[in-house]
Amino acid sequence: MELFESFDTLLRTFWIVASISSVIFIIQTIMTFIGADATDGVNADFDGDFDGTDAPFQLFSLRNLINFLLGFSWTGISFYNTIENKTILILVAFLVGVLFLFMFFVIIKQIQKLAEDNTFKLAQTLNKSAEVYLTIPERKTGKGKITISINGSFHELEAMTENDKISNGTLVKIVKIESDNILIVETI
């Protein structure tokens, strides 16, 4: 403790900020790996109107503050004896803190590129070909079924035709979607 008390006020401040932010960072990291914190700084820690922005993350979050403080404080400690001018030291520490924040944004942006939406949407079937699974009666007098592959998975969907009856195994093209989520098909 005597060593800590002998430090200059600025160096002591850097050490306090570094200690607190490092402990919080370690806790956040552990929580992330056990699944307790799934947002990774994507959401703001306060209520605010961010409508109209397409940013995938918010600038003001606890995680971003901790990342900034880590860069700021550890740079201040590392260069305290190297940079004599304290104003320049604080400026360099601030810039490194901003660099830490920027690096975090770049990493999160790269991770978000890995996300993939494979949700099946009926609109994806338009103008695609399918195979009749259950015979489709003529002129919308009843429903049949088709099988179609979308994004590598097969779907069995109800279908009708505006023309003549279509038998099992016939290839058809989906021309429109009725309001009841029934596909209108025609032979190819």
Image (cartoon, helix red, strand yellow):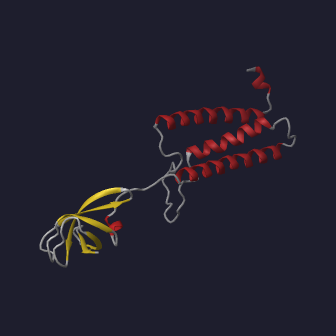
In the image, residue 145 sits, relative to residue 25, either above or below, namely: below
Residue 132 locus on image (x, y percent): 23, 65
As drawn, which residue projects farthest toward the right?
Answer: 84
Q: Is residue 142 left or right of residue 111?
A: left
Residue drawn at x 67%, y 39% is 70
Residue drawn at x 65%, y 49% is 103
Quick one: 76 or 174, which is closer to the camera?
174
Figure quadrant of residue 93: top right
Residue drawn at x 76%, y 25% is 5
Figure quadrant of residue 79: top right
In the image, residue 59 sits, relative to residue 179, either above or below, namely: above
Check the picture and name the quadrant holding the N terminus. Answer: top right
Residue 75 locus on image (x, y percent): 75, 40
Q: Is residue 153 left or right of residue 46?
A: left
Check the picture and name the quadrant holding the C terminus. Answer: bottom left
Quick one: 44 or 148, which is closer to the camera?
148
As drawn, which residue projects farthest toward the front?
Answer: 169
Q: Is residue 37 left or right of residue 86?
A: left
In the image, residue 164 sits, relative to residue 84, either above or below, namely: below
Residue drawn at x 54%, y 59% is 55
Residue 135 locus on image (x, y percent): 16, 66
Residue 73 locus on image (x, y percent): 71, 39
